[in-house]
């Protein structure tokens, strides 16, 4: 089983990364390795809506997304972790998601969805933010759901943690790290 993780936070060792590390630990304990992408450290151009992928399902922009596209095609499980900024996923992860328009074209226009593979395809969404209301997390989940369905991930679990803002504050949450660990274990169970 191949697992891919996307770290949407530009803040090193921030709350999002701490949550994702706990998920990665759980997956690795189950005997699986993870391919981790950090969009904030990659050469990723935003989607230009040029239409270049409409007829082929292939993006015409050549940058670090080539590696991401290959990993998405080959993986069985996906973990997407992002802070919530202004009621949405981070710009860094949103850039990566928007570039998956090529998969959208491939699936919906060309009728060639990514095959499910031997283990099927499942996802886990982790979000954290300083806001006290849930609306921003619903917005982030809507974007992540569109992403997951586009890359042919028919189901995902969502965990989010509100009112967590200061760097490292997630460590003080009474259940977050345990919940994420357990969700990641469920993600890779067959």
Image (spheres, rainbow, N blue to C red):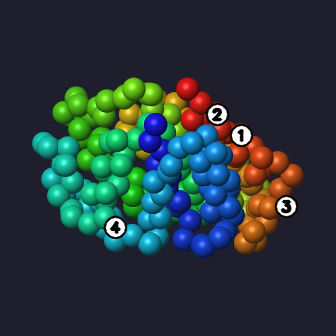
Q: Say which residue label 2 marks.
A: 186
Q: Farthest residue to the left: give it.
A: 55
Q: Work out whether 12 lies above or below 83.
A: below
Q: At which x and y percent is residue 2?
A: 44, 42
From the image, state whether disc 3 or disc 2 is nearer to you. 2
- For the residues bearing labels 1 and 2, Cβ distance under 8 angstroms: yes
Please give the label number shown on residue 172. Answer: 3
- For the residues bearing labels 2 and 4, Cβ distance under 8 angstroms: no
Q: Earlier in the sequence, mark 3 or mark 2?
A: 3
Left or right of 105, for residue 2: right
Q: Earlier in the sequence, mark 3 or mark 1?
A: 3
Q: Give the mark count.
A: 4
Q: Say which residue label 1 marks.
A: 182
Label 3: state its secondary structure.
Answer: helix
Q: Work out which quarter of the rendered image holds the C terminus and state it.
A: top right
Q: At which x and y percent is residue 104?
A: 30, 41
Label 4: state its secondary structure.
Answer: loop
The answer to which of 131 and 105 lies nearer the viewer is: 105
Q: At which x and y percent is residue 163?
A: 78, 59
Q: Is residue 84 visible?
A: no
- Quote the CA–CA distance across marks 3 and 1: 18 Å
- Quote the CA–CA distance across marks 3 and 4: 34 Å
**Who's the residue at 39% across and 26% down the image?**
118
Q: Say which residue label 4 marks.
A: 44
**Who's the residue at 59% across and 30% down the image?**
189
Q: Earlier in the sequence, mark 2 or mark 4?
A: 4
């Amino acid at each position: 089983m191949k697992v891919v993780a996307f770290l949407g936070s530009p803040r090193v060792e921030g709350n999002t990364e701490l949550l994702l590390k706990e998920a990665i630990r759980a997956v690795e304990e189950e005997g699986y390795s993870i391919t981790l992408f950090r969009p904030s450290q990659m050469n990723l151009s935003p989607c230009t809506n040029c239409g270049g992928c409409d007829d082929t399902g292939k993006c015409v922009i050549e940058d670090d997304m080539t590696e991401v596209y290959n990993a998405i095609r080959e993986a069985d499980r996906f973990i997407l972790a992002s802070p919530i900024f202004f009621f949405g996923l981070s710009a860094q992860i949103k850039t990566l998601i928007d570039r998956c328009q090529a998969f959208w074209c491939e699936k919906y226009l060309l009728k060639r969805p990514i095959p499910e593979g031997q283990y099927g395809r499942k996802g886990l969404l982790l979000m954290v933010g300083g806001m006290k209301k849930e609306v921003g997390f619903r917005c982030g989940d809507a974007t992540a759901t569109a992403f997951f369905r586009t890359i042919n991930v028919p189901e995902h679990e969502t965990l989010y943690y509100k009112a967590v803002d200061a760097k490292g504050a997630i460590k003080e949450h009474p259940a977050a790290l345990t919940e994420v660990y357990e969700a990641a274990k469920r993600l890779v169970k067959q």
